[in-house]
Amino acid sequence: MDRELAIEFARVTEAAALAAARWMGTGKKNEADQAATTAMRAVFDTIDIEGTVVIGEGEMDEAPMLYIGERLGRGKDQVDVAVDPLEGTNIVAKGLWNAMAVIAVAPAGTLLHAPDMYMEKLAVGPEARGLVALEAEVEDNLHAVARAKGKAIEDVVAILLDRPRHQTLIDRIRKTGARIKLITDGDVAAALNTAFAETGVDIMFGSGGAPEGVLAAAALKCLGGELQGRLLPADDTERERCIRMGISDPAQVLRMEDLIRGDDAIFAATGVTEGELLRGVRFLGGSIATTHSLVMRASSGTVRFIETRHDLSKKPNLVFV
């Protein structure tokens, strides 16, 4: 993929974030998601790619745009596109932390077409890559991260979704002496934070959406980190769907190369609300707004943080409703 596309994809997430941020704290998560999706879709039409959505807003009969299988762009480079126009719809509705607009793009046929179900996940940054395993005991993984980072176990921070299904996991982590950061939503941001020391997060545990697992894997591939996953089909229907999507053994542990093949991928995210890594959209008065984005390429290892000032009066096509 052309390296110039990285900045183009930042334009995509910026538009989605600007649109969603108008709904921050309003209690209207569906409206926020629709605004982000509409804005993201519009900007994709201006980019020189021939993209196919492999992870999106749902099947064609479930979503009017950015649905799985939809074609995007106006160019010739054939790519897989994974999107989450608004990761953290509840976060935005409640005005909480770490909502983002997120995309991952890779050459056609390289992104896992993850079915919409739960996935058990384990994510770490580059220091602990290759030293943890989803099959290992929780305690062993925590101590492995502590050793890799030169920390006492009491200084290790694990992050996971605050859900009743995670209570046993929470108890085991606390028993080791490690600390926990519980989040309401947004485990792409959680996985991403494991690769940046300044966020204070060392390892991510627990189950969340499988599509988000692929997005997080793309981000960690760019950063030299690692995500391992295992699909958790709830019934025979979901197990059959895994098989139809090319996953013959839903119980297998999915490694980085299963989630995203090769080394050519681009990940972009723009903060919608404030977070440990990305600042949220700020409306400064008049028609001026600012965004804070992260754009990365796996092939080069380049990581860019982009601060952008927008004059919204000159962006009449940006959809806010």
Image (cartoon, helix red, strand yellow):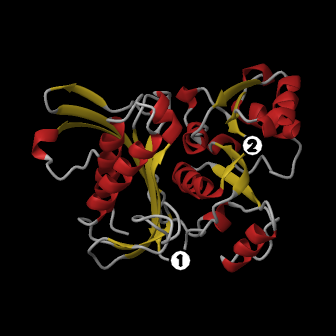
Separation of marks 1 and 2 at Cα, in angstroms: 28 Å
Where is 242 relative to 281, above or below?
below
**Disc assigned to residue 109:** 1
Q: Is residue 266 left or right of 231 when viewed as pictured?
A: left
Image quadrant occupied by the N terminus: bottom left
| Residue nearest the viewer, comparing 313 with 6 | 313
Where is 154 relative to 44, above or below?
above
- Figure quadrant of residue 73: bottom left
Residue 306, position in %: x, y? 32, 40
Q: Residue at x 51, y 34 (%)?
A: 91
Q: Is residue 46 left or right of 145 when viewed as pictured?
A: left
Residue 173 visible in the picture: yes
Where is 273 relative to 136, above or below?
above
Q: Is mark 2 on a helix, strand or loop?
A: loop
Residue 88 visible in the picture: no
- Figure quadrant of residue 285: top left
**Disc assigned to residue 15:** none
Q: Mark 2 points at which residue?
A: 206
